[in-house]
Image (cartoon, rainbow, N blue to C red):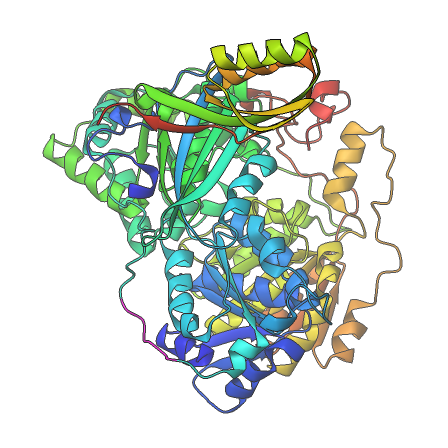
Amino acid sequence: MSALHIKKGASKHSAYNLRPTFSDVMERHTLAVLVENEPGVLARVIGLFSGRGYNIESLTVAEVDHTGHLSRITIVTTGTPQVIEQIKAQLGRIVPVHDVHDLTVEGASVERELAMLKVIGEGDKRVEALRLADIFRANVVDSTLNSFVFEITGAPEKIDAFADLMRPLGLSEIARTGVAALLRGD
Amino acid sequence: MVVQALKDQGVDTVFGYPGGAVLPIYDEIFQQNDIRHILVRHEQGAVHAAEGYARSTGKPGVALVTSGPGATNAVTGLTDALMDSIPIIVLTGQVPTFMIGSDAFQEADTVGITRPCTKHNWLVKETDQLAATLHEAFHVATAGRPGPVLIDIPKDVQFATGKYAPPKPSTSHYQPRLKGDMEEITELVAAMETAKRPIFYTGGGVINSGPAASQLLRELVDATGFPITSTLMGLGAYPASGKNWLGMLGMHGLYEANLAMHDCDLMINIGARFDDRITGRIDAFSPKSIKAHIDIDPSSINKVIKADIPIVGDVAHVLEDILKVWKSRGRKTNAEAVAKWMGVIDGWRSKNCLAYTNSETSIKPQYALERLEALTKDRKDRFICTEVGQHQMWAAQFLGFEDPNHWMTSGGLGTMGYGFPASIGVQMAHPDALVINVAGEASWLMNMQELGTAAQYRLPVKQFILNNERLGMVRQWQELLHGERYSHSWSEALPDFVKLAEAFGAKGILCKDPADLDDAIMEMIEYDGPVIFDCLVEKHENCFPMIPSGKAHNEMLLGEAETQGVIDAKGSILV
């Protein structure tokens, strides 16, 4: 069935591995879920996670195909292999879900997140913040005499690292978009 | 437009209750004669009746209720249908679109409330979308794993006139796969050829797949000679009189069925979902077997029990392919080993796990059901509904089902109050059939208002109440688990059921002497109209066999053995 992305032929060769080994190891997976852009569809996805006790580390959603009324939800989740398989199967069961891709198993993927950080400080701290921002290729999108707003794009770990460095330099606020991800290559 | 869409979908009966937000639809219903509307006495009853209709016909059931309280009262029925995969369509009225969100009179966020308890739901805000949404709802409810759907229709959309389009084959992307993977099917057939201790474990999915699935199952079981057991929901797919039938499995299943599940080397799960009532302790569940799992819903596979041979597909399609492959490979089985296996099972069967001590002075509930079975089993048109509790398990143990769609019970959700309205739905679908609801007095009281419905339409539903003046299953658990402290598990201030029946113009029968039982049952069957049969039974009878919570299949309790302390602290937190 297409919504579940189970390929014709052997199901064990599909992205939906129906023969997992049950293990207790927690894994982090990035799922890309293509959904019909209709009212309530995000609530269905979120309700599934809260109702069945799954984790959401990050979730982003936006329309990606205006004519086809499709939105792409990127979810970063953690769980044992069995739980991850359940999450995918349960997502596939939601009627307006067209496709579920597990970017973590389907091949190498790129993950990017955008964050904005407000740093308040004066003197050396201000200079240091600007210098580090340069190293991290963060842009200054707003500036006053005692504050900057930096915009940074990158893998979540890079943003974590940047935020850690900004903290002693006067980090006062941070806004993150959550992860967007695509498979590499064609 | 709504009524036209229902007609075009082949609907002949709607169960409902009017209210302000559905008046335009009721006005249309008034002005036509093709669809019968059955006025229930509570919206929960409408949904359960639709479930009974659906379960006994294989067609989707339809309920129509108003906004706000009408919709919230439907929630239990929707959840029940979701758990048991019953296709129903519930139409709810809604306040006009321009008033949504204003806390209007009888407004509720119906699609929000019912999102987790429906397979899918829709709020239709544009009249032009209404017809297509209604048709799509029938597709979603019945395609793949069936389930309840809900359409919320604001009152202004009901009043407006729009374009009506008749149903056409669904073009939506929701097209669940029906055919199983041939590679996996071949692997299963190969396992069947060599298995020494095989067993079929079947569930409600066989019934949902349609009559062809039951036919194919019977052919496969009889041709291979493998034993077969079934869940509560799957009873009737294989006939109880069949020679390979082991009886129901699970918490209150038969000893031979559960031990066969525990010791088998090949388990073939067809349309069942390894429910916790079936598996008992997961890590001790059938430790030595290869497990094949056939299910149309991929999320059922590996959810609870790891499947060695997973097959995603519709039961009828998969069984057809299994038979085809098995025959083409020469119809092989390990006949000698299977015969030996049947011998082992016969040894377990000789325990006679359903044995009970009968009494000459009081009616044992098991005896009441044995007599009911003896006096009604020859009727092909017998349909049985149940409520939830001890009586339900006894009914599953002591009544034999020969055909699918003749057994309506609330399995997954365990809804007390299901049986009576369900029996009304069954009787509407089968006007001349013998429809019996085996009930406990406490469950029955939960939807007793439907006596008004049964009386109004003169539906000859037989309410066979095993009255022990207790919440029997709760009492049993309190006896086993909570030091015999029977907290609030008795039925105080019960009505006089005979007078209650008469007050509604129905017939009431009271029976308390085992010697009178047969005559009383015959009187119930022969009466043309609704009957409440108040069968006063032994008050402290426990339902055995039983696998206590947190125990494995081979740790079953049989009969009135010493049952104290059998459930450890870990097990007692399970329900």
- Residues B22 and B493: in front is B22
Q: Can residue B442 be seen in this snapshot? A: yes
Q: Quadrant of residue A10?
A: top left
In terms of image quadrants, where is residue B6? Answer: bottom left
Main SS, magenta residues: loop
* Residue B286 left/right relative to B156: left
The magenta span reads: B163-168
Q: Is B394 situated above or below B110? A: above
> Quadrant of the image for the N terminus of chain B?
bottom left
Give residue A156's position: percent from left, percent from top: 50, 19
Q: Position of residue B556 (x, y in %)?
A: 60, 25
Q: Left of B267 or right of it: where is A186? A: left
Judge left or right: residue B211 versus residue B460: left
Q: Which part of the image, by quadrant, shows the C terminus of chain B?
A: top right
Asked whether residue B165 is drawn in magenta, I would say yes
Give the camera-side residue of B92 and B415. B92
